[in-house]
Image (cartoon, rainbow, N blue to C red):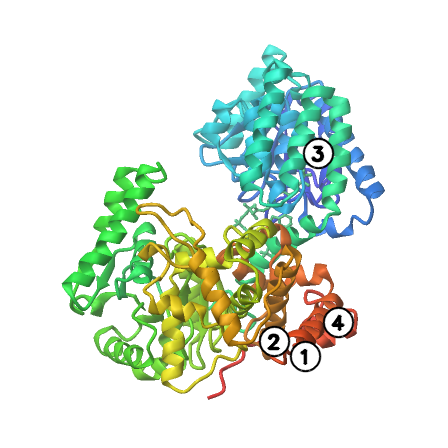
């Protein structure tokens, strides 16, 4: 082993130079790595002992791409262009090596990793390896020739799919598409060396830049670009990077490799400096930071979850049971009556059938998942499960009784989780007699689909319980975010303000369709009213009823009466065929209903509100300002650890557009001074319920941002509810 570089090693094995990138944890192309790879290839070219060379990654993966941490250091278009030219030149130099150069892939070859692999003459991979150009998920396009070499290897359609969606492609498909040349079933390095020697024997170097047949005829390849651009109209929802990738691919097809590369370099520069990219990079790191709880170290012991139970087979309970079954964990599903149990199971079966009919799961997977769900009317078997999730109605007395039962029927180390979306978990934690084992696990509707799991820390929740909760989130393929125990926790506390504004806008003169469309245009998958028709108007109405019954007022200001009227009329949303919209039998297509305008007019008259026309900009500004202002209160009070935690929740729980980074990052990009000015203006116009959050005032006055707020001023521990 030659210590020519800490980051890249060089050695000769069986007449082949082995170049090993060793930059843990993911062999990112940090400064020094590309240079060292190039130097090692030059050395192999000159080395009389080497007949060929293999590029391989040390540790668990090949190269996972550029080092994302360094994107922030790109200050101008010129410096981006300069850097890109340098990396393109390096890859051209590597590709021009006179001896066969083979990339040996395990783990993932992503972004710049795949681009380095494509500059090699051939690629081999282990069966479990994956390749991809995920740059679009960071708001950029491949910047080291990916948009030029990939279509030449795999054809325009495949390259377009990869560069506009960013998905990871398994080795087998990559082989079929021509991205890799052989799958190595045994030891990767030995297989790669054998492959390299074969190529040395046959004298084969093949430069992907010179392959033209896959992008011929040009008209067909360009038609694929047009088709992709059209399809993006539905999926990209306002993001720019996917379109930029298509543009770079068109350049690859129309201009040839060199001019196409020059175009890629320019487009990359525009993207890397965009707000969209900055937002998505912040989100990438925030998604990883949520797993880091300052006072719960990584090595905190956790409980092994081998079996589970769910109490309540309603929409949420059924969805939660499906999550466990999908993860291969047997789950008991308990209801009080046979009818309710049958109804719940029928919905579960219908959900699986719909996934199977869409080809998302096989019949076998469906059968297996269903066989893991055991319906029951009793607590039999609860004494052996490792976790129980309570998903009964949102009613404190019912929860208290349920937790008292669970404390009695489960084993002492069983985790007792609650799917409450608002209530004080300390109250029913005490009822269980084992508050250290109690944690909130708040799922989002539909629970078997949405990625977010909001974990709620009670005042006595133990660190082991928290660490186990985070582990369960991962196991269920969710993203777990730990929050403090305040009313509505973080997700619904903010949604209450989001919905308040939507309701008030409706009364003030905007239509349900205008508000929903303005938000969809902003990038949400569905607007607030469409969302509520999916989740159920009854859910919020029952919470309001409960609050009234215990003499509590909602804190988020004036409430429209319209949702309660809809509830009284039995219009709960999609499940009853009518809510904010009307639905035809068996259809989920929302049809505008003139009745809602009548109700809005009536409610406006009752509150003496003068109705007026509104712009989409005003709608988006009001709603996003309400979110950011309340987010600032939550941060200030210490119920969320970081602004990124809130953003991750909104992206994964409600589909807030990734390319805007989440409500807090979005507010930073709007400018906190502008956000604060709006709050003041709304206060003057609409009333005192618009309070500027102290943290917003403080940061806006100091010219700061939520993300720039110093670590020292952030809470290290989540706050607890004051009783
Ligand atoms: N740069 C810097 N840090 C990275 C990184 C990267 N590319 N990838 C991962 N990390 C860190 C991550 O923050 C975490 O740190 C740790 O590594 C483990 O990651 C020129 C411009 C590779 C599939 O988009 O998709 O190439 O939290 O927890 O679940 O055209 O990481 O431990 O401190 O995610 O095993 C394109 C991004 C870049 C790949 C591994 N590449 N990474 O998943 O571990 S742009 C990507 C991933 C580019 C070129 C362009 C995943 C993974 P910490 P992890 P994992």
Secondary structure beneath disc 1?
Answer: helix
- Exactly how many numbered labels are in the figure? 4
Would you say the residues marked 4 and 1 are in contact, meaning their CB atoms lie under 8 Å apart?
A: no
Q: Is residue 3 above or below residue 542?
A: above
Would you say the residues marked 2 and 3 are in contact, meaning their CB atoms lie under 8 Å apart?
A: no
Mark 1 → mark 3, Cα distance in angstroms: 45 Å
Mark 4 → mark 1, Cα distance in angstroms: 10 Å
Looking at the image, which residue sits at the far top? 202
Looking at the rendered structure, which numbered label has been put on residue 35?
none
Of residues 135 and 607, the one nearer the viewer is: 607
Sequence-wise, which precedes: disc 4 or disc 1? 1
On screen, residue 345 versus residue 141, left or right, reads left
Q: Residue at x 62, y 41 (%)?
A: 136
Sequence-wise, which precedes: disc 2 or disc 3? 3
Label 3 CB sits under 8 Å from any ligand 1 atom: yes
Secondary structure beneath disc 2?
Answer: helix
Which residue corresponds to mark 4? Answer: 700
Sequence-wise, which precedes: disc 2 or disc 1? 2
Mark 2 → mark 4, Cα distance in angstroms: 14 Å
Which residue corresponds to mark 1? Answer: 694
Mark 4 → mark 3, Cα distance in angstroms: 39 Å
Would you say the residues marked 2 and 1 are in contact, meaning their CB atoms lie under 8 Å apart?
A: yes
On screen, residue 590 versus residue 514, left or right, reads left
Label 4 CB sits under 8 Å from any ligand 1 atom: no
Q: x, y percentage for residue 178? A: 53, 22
Which tag is nearer the camera, tag 4 or tag 3?
4
Which residue corresponds to mark 2? Answer: 633
Q: Quadrant of the N terminus?
A: top right
Would you say the residues marked 1 and 3 are in contact, meaning their CB atoms lie under 8 Å apart?
A: no
């Amino acid at each position: 082993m030659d210590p020519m570089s800490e980051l890249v090693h060089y050695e000769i094995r069986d007449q082949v130079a082995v170049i090993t990138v060793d930059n843990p944890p993911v062999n990112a192309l940090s400064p020094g790595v590309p240079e060292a790879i190039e130097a090692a290839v030059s050395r192999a070219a000159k080395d009389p002992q080497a007949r060929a060379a293999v590029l391989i990654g040390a540790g668990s993966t090949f190269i996972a791409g550029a080092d994302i941490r360094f994107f922030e250091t790109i200050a101008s278009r010129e410096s981006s262009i300069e850097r890109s030219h340098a990396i393109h030149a390096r890859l051209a130099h590597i590709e021009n090596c006179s001896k066969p150069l083979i990339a040996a892939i395990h783990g993932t070859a992503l972004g710049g990793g795949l681009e380095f692999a494509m500059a090699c003459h051939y690629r081999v991979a282990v069966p479990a390896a994956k390749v991809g150009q995920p740059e679009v998920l960071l708001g950029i396009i491949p910047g080291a020739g990916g948009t030029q070499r990939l279509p030449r290897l795999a054809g325009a359609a495949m390259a377009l799919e990869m560069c506009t969606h960013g998905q990871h492609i398994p080795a087998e498909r990559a082989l079929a598409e021509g991205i890799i040349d052989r799958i190595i079933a045994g030891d990767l390095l030995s297989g790669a060396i054998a492959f390299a020697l074969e190529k040395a024997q046959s004298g084969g170097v093949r430069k992907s830049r010179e392959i033209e047949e896959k992008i011929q005829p040009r008209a067909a390849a360009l038609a694929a670009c047009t088709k992709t651009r059209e399809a993006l109209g539905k999926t990209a929802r306002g993001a720019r990077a996917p379109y930029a990738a298509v543009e770079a691919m068109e350049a690859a097809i129309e201009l040839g490799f060199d001019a196409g590369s020059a175009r890629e370099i320019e487009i990359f520069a525009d993207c890397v400096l965009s707000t969209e990219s900055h937002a998505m990079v912040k989100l990438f790191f925030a998604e990883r930071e949520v797993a880091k709880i300052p006072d719960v170290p990584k090595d905190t012991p956790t409980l092994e979850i081998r079996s589970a139970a769910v109490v309540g087979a309603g929409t949420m309970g059924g969805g939660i049971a499906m999550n466990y079954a999908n993860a291969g964990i047997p789950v008991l599903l308990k209801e009080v009556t046979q009818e309710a149990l049958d109804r719940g199971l029928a919905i579960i079966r219908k959900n699986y059938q719909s996934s199977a009919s869409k080809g998302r799961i096989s019949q076998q997977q469906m059968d297996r998942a269903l066989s893991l769900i055991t319906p029951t009317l009793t607590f039999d078997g609860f004494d052996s499960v490792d976790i129980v999730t309570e998903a009964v109605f949102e009613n404190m007395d019912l929860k208290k009784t349920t937790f008292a039962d669970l404390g009695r029927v489960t084993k002492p180390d069983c985790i007792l989780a609650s799917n409450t979306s608002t209530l004080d978990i300390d109250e029913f934690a005490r009822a269980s007699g084992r508050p250290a084992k109690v944690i909130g696990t708040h799922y989002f509707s539909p629970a078997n689909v949405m990625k977010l799991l909001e974990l709620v820390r009670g005042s006595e929740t133990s660190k082991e319980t928290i660490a186990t909760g985070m582990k369960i989130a991962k196991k269920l393929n969710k993203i777990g975010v730990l929050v403090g125990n305040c009313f509505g926790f973080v997700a619904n506390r903010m949604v209450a303000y989001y919905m308040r504004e939507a309701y008030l806008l409706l009364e003030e003169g905007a239509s349900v369709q205008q508000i929903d469309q303005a938000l969809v245009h902003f990038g949400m998958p569905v607007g607030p009213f469409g969302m509520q028709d999916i989740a159920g108007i009854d859910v919020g109405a029952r919470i309001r009823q409960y609050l009234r019954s215990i003499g509590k007022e909602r804190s988020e200001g004036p409430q429209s009466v319209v949702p309660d009227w809809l509830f009284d009329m039995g219009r709960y949303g999609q499940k009853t065929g009518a809510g904010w919209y009307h639905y035809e039998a068996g259809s989920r297509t929302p049809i505008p209903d003139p009745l809602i305008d009548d109700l809005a007019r009536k409610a406006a008259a009752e509150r003496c509100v003068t109705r007026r026309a509104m712009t989409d900009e005003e709608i988006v500004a009001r709603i996003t300002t309400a979110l950011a202002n309340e987010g600032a209160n939550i941060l200030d009070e210490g119920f969320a650890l970081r602004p990124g935690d809130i953003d991750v929740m909104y992206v994964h729980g409600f589909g807030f557009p990734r390319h805007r980074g989440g409500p807090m990052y979005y507010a930073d990009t709007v400018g906190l001074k502008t956000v604060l000015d709006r709050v003041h203006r709304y206060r003057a116009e609409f009333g005192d319920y618009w309070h500027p959050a102290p943290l917003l005032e403080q940061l806006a006055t100091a010219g700061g941002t939520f993300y720039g707020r110093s670590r020292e001023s952030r809470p290290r521990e989540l706050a607890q509810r004051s009783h």
